Amino acid sequence: MVVGRECGAPWRVGHEGAEVRAYIAAALKHHECKFKAWMEKRQRGATFFNFMRQIEQKVGRGGLIYSNLFAFDFDGQDPRACKEHYESVIEPLSRELLKAQIDHFRPDLIIFANGVTSMQVRRRIFPHAPGVVKGGQDWSAAPHSIPNSQLWEFELYGRYRCLRIQHPSNYSKPAARARQFLVDRLLPAAP
């Protein structure tokens, strides 16, 4: 599972009928179509979906789960800009949705690729507290000396191995080195 913080896509979803189930079905179909299109569109530079394609080459698309730190955007932008509703609506619903996705999919590995600008959000959703976030591996002793600011490993709920990296759009050499270090160590999908 890769958790990003993608906020700029056109996500206006129509639906048939007035039921919540109709909207959810339409939103899931929309997400599936958008994800497929993004994965097939080659782009230049460091982008979130170029990173996703690198992971897909190692684990296969069937083993790849795309999720988002935020359940909503705000007019195509970062939802934290919506001061009126962010704390009371957006972040609590984002927390519930992300936890439900983790419970449903039970991923072997979770890569938080949402960067430092949303680090505090991730820490509020998954606080460093007993039973939630445990430990952390320092990668500075790795062959290429990857600092914790670029790659950090921890355990979530005593069950899920997690890695946290900068957002893939970060062009810095240390961030790129940490991403490649992570991708190189992913286990290939079983045949």
Image: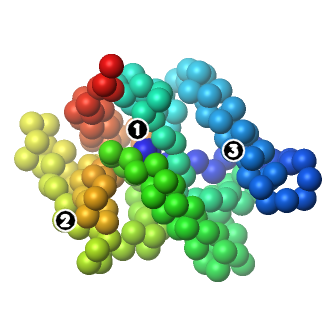
| 91 in relation to 108, above or below | below
Place of residue 166 in the rendered image (x, y in percent of width and height, measured from the top left)? 38, 48
Which residue was labeled with disc 2? 135
User: For mark 2, does the 10 Å Cα neighbourhood hold few (<14), some (14 to 19), or many (20 or more) residues?
Assistant: few
Q: Nearer the viewer, mark 2 or mark 3?
A: 3
Visible residue check, residue 185:
yes
Which residue was labeled with disc 1? 171
Circles 2, 1 touching at the beta carbon (< 8 Å): no
Report the side of 167 relative to 150 (left or right).
right
Q: Kindly report the distance in space between the C-alpha atoms of the residues bearing marks 2 and 1.
A: 28 Å
- Earlier in the chain: of badge 2 and badge 3, it is 3
- Earlier in the chain: of badge 2 and badge 1, it is 2
User: For mark 3, does the 10 Å Cα neighbourhood hold few (<14), some (14 to 19), or many (20 or more) residues?
Assistant: few
| Disc 1 secondary structure class | loop
| 114 in relation to 79, above or below | above
Residue 83: name its quadrant: bottom right
- Earlier in the chain: of badge 1 and badge 3, it is 3
Q: Residue at x 78, y 45 (%)?
A: 26
| Residue type indicated by callout 1 | Tyr
Q: Residue at x 46, y 49 (%)?
A: 105
Circles 2, 3 touching at the beta carbon (< 8 Å): no
| Residue type indicated by callout 2 | Gly
Visible residue check, residue 166:
no
Q: Nearer the viewer, mark 2 or mark 1?
A: 2
Place of residue 45 in the rendered image (x, y in percent of width and height, measured from the top left)? 48, 28
The N terminus, quarter of image: top left
| Residue type indicated by callout 3 | Leu
Which residue was labeled with disc 3? 28
Residue 129: name its quadrant: bottom left
Place of residue 160 in the rendered image (x, y in percent of width and height, measured from the top left)? 31, 55
